[in-house]
Amino acid sequence: MAQNHDVALTVNGLKTFMYTNKRCNKAVNGVSFQIKKGKTLCIVGESGCGKSVTASAVMQLLPTLSRIEEGEIIYHADRGDIRIDQLPRNGRQMRAIRGAEMAMIFQDPMTALNPVYTVGFQIIENLKYHTALKGRLLRDKAIDLLRSMGIPLPERRVDEFPHRYSGGMRQRAMIAMAMACNPKILIADEPTTALDVTIQAQIFELMDRLKKEHGTAIMLITHDMGAVAELADDVAVMYMGNIVEAGNVDEVLRNPVHPYTRALLASIPVLGRGRNQDIQAIPGSTPDPFDRPTGCQFAPRCAFASDVCAAMPDETFVTDTHRVMCWRYEEFAHAAAQ
Ligand SMILES: Nc1ncnc2c1ncn2[C@@H]1O[C@H](COP(=O)(O)OP(=O)(O)OP(=O)(O)O)[C@@H](O)[C@H]1O
C-alpha cells in the first residue's frame, strides 16, 4: 500500500451488511482500497455488487437498517488520521467532515439540491456552515463557483431555483456545491448516467480539472468503461461485495486476470471501436444476495471454475500495483492469452 502522505483515504477489510425482513445481506463483504491525493479511483461492477453501499459507508450515509460490521475507514486529514467508521453517523465531527472535507455527488442532482431554495442560497448555506466567509464574499464565492463550473451568466443564475436549470446545469450546480469547500475527497456515484454524451464529457473534464488543480482524491462509481479508461488512475472491480481485481488502470485494463473482469470488459461496447465489436453478455446472473455461494462468488458463472473455487479465494498480488481474488488466475490468464 502507498505511504500515508500520498493517500487521502484508506479502507481496510470493510464489511457492511444490510438487514431486510430479519435477513442479512452481506452487501460489502471485506473490501480494501486506497484513494490517493489528486488521483481517481474508479469502482466498476454490475448492479447490486456493493458500489453504492461502499460509498455510503465512507460518507457515513448508510440507510438505517445497515451497519458497518468490521474494518476500518481512515481519512488521512492534514491534522492526522481520522477513523470515520468510529464516528457517530450524525455527530458533530462527522457533520463537519461531510460537505467540507469529504463531499458526494449523485446520479440525480435533486438528491442534493433542494427545489424550494435558489441554487445560490444553497451554495451560500454550505459556505456559511463550513467556512469563515461572511456577507458579500459569500455571494461572490457562489458566483465564482458557478462560473468555474461553466454555468453561463452566473450572476443571474445564482438567484434561480434548480428547476430553471437544465439537467447538465443541475449536475454542475451540485458539483459546485460539493466543491464549495474544496473537499479533499470527492465521491461521485454514477454522476453522469442520466446525461447526454456531450454533457457527460464536460462533467468528466471538470472532475479531471478539479483533481489536477486542487489535488482532490476522487472515487468515481461508474458503469462506463470509457470513463474508466479516460479518468481513472486506479480501478477496483467489484462482484457480490468483494473487490475481485484492482490496481493501476493500465495494468488492469491491458491485462485483466480475473475471469469476471475479462467478462465485464467483453460485455461493454467501447466507444470508437465501431459497430462490429465482439460483445459478449456475461452468462448467468448474479446470485440471490441472501443466498450467496460460500466460496468464490463468481464461480457459478465462471467457465473456468473448479473444485478449489468452493473456498473463498485469498487476495494475491499479480504485481505491486495489481491484485486479484481468484485461485486460478494464472492458469486462466495463460489460457486466455492462447
Ligand atoms: N437501502 C437499501 N436497503 C436494503 N438493501 C439495499 C439498500 N441499498 C442497497 N441494498 C442492497 O445492497 C447490495 C449492494 O447494493 P448497491 O446499491 O451498493 O449496489 P451497486 O453496485 O451500487 O448497484 P447499482 O449499480 O445498481 O447502483 C444489493 O444486494 C442491494 O440490494
Image (tube, rainbow, N blue to C red):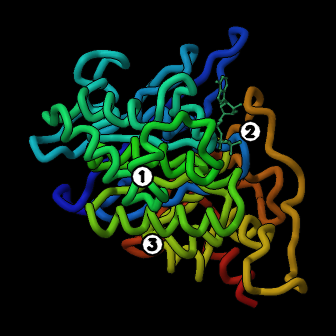
Position of residue 246 relative to residue 45, above or below, is below
Tell me which numbered mark, 3 or 1, is placed earlier along the sequence.
1
The x and y percentages for residue 59 are 41, 33
Residue farthest to the top, as pictured: 22
Residue farthest to the left, as pictured: 79
Residue plotted at (70% across, 50% down): 194
Mark yes or no: residue 115 visible: yes
In the drawing, does residue 149 fall left or right of residue 270?
left
- Residue topped by disc 3: 248
- Residue topped by disc 2: 293
Residue plotted at (48% across, 26% down): 117
Q: Quadrant of the C terminus?
A: bottom right
In the drawing, does residue 92 fall left or right of residue 292?
left
Say which mark, if any, is on residue 154.
Answer: 1
Say which mark, if any, is on residue 98.
Answer: none
Give, as a three-letter code, the residue at label 3.
Answer: Asn
Q: Quadrant of the N terminus?
A: bottom left
Q: Name the one closer to the observer, 254 or 325.
A: 254
Tag 3's secondary structure? strand
Residue plotted at (31% across, 57% down): 216
The label nearer to you, 3 versus 2, is 3
Position of residue 252 relative to residue 158, above or below, is below
On the image, which quarter does residue 90 sit in? top left
Give, as a three-letter code, the residue at label 2.
Answer: Pro
Give, as a three-letter code, the residue at label 1.
Answer: Pro
Mark yes or no: residue 13 visible: no
The x and y percentages for residue 164 are 61, 40
Tell me which numbered mark, 2 or 1, is placed earlier along the sequence.
1
Q: Name the one closer to the observer, 15 or 212.
A: 212
The x and y percentages for residue 333 are 66, 78
- Few, some or many C-alpha atoms within 10 Å of disc 1 (few <14, some 14-19, many ≥20)? some
Residue farthest to the front, as pictured: 156
